[in-house]
Amino acid sequence: MLAFNIQNPEERPEIDHVDTNRSNNRLSNLRWAFPKENMNNFETLKKISKKIQVTHSDGTQEIIWGISNVAKKYNFIHSTVSRYMNNGKTYKGYKFVGERLIIVLLIL
């Protein structure tokens, strides 16, 4: 529907759902975007930008940005990290505590 109703003079290859709800296909919620613009959507950033504190079984801690990066580093499934981060329990000797990144936009 977007392809027929909104011009795309810059030939942006993706459709961005402004509110990040992919089932909300109202024209007012859709825009053409380059991949980087799509990932830099403020609503998307609020969802994916979490600082994760990982506590190892020996008590050492490290900070990793994003659940996907934690999952990749430890070869865990993304949903497993998210589930254990939310329930506060340990998984295979690791405890995950997430903190949302506060994003401040300055409009000049």
Image: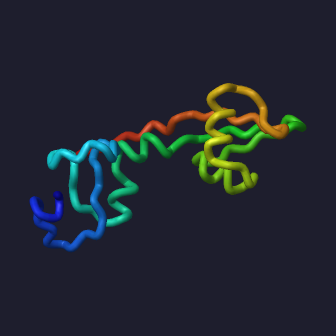
Is residue 9 visible to us here? yes
* Relative side of 72 to 13, left or right: right
Quadrant that contains the N terminus: bottom left
Q: Position of residue 22 (x, y in %)?
A: 33, 47
Tally the marks: 0
In this view of the protein, which residue sits in the foreground, 3 or 16? 3
Check the image and name the residue furthest to the right: 58
Residue 20 lies left or right of residue 82; in this view the side is left
Indicate whether 15 appears above or below 8.
above
Q: Residue at x 42, y 46 (%)?
A: 45
Residue placed most toward the observer, 77 or 59: 77
Residue 54 place in picture, x, y as percent: 73, 40
Left or right of 84, for residue 101? left
Seen at 60% across and 46% down, the residue is 67
Q: Residue at x 36, y 64 (%)?
A: 35
Q: Residue at x 30, y 64 (%)?
A: 14
| Residue 108 seen anywhere in this rendered image of the structure | no
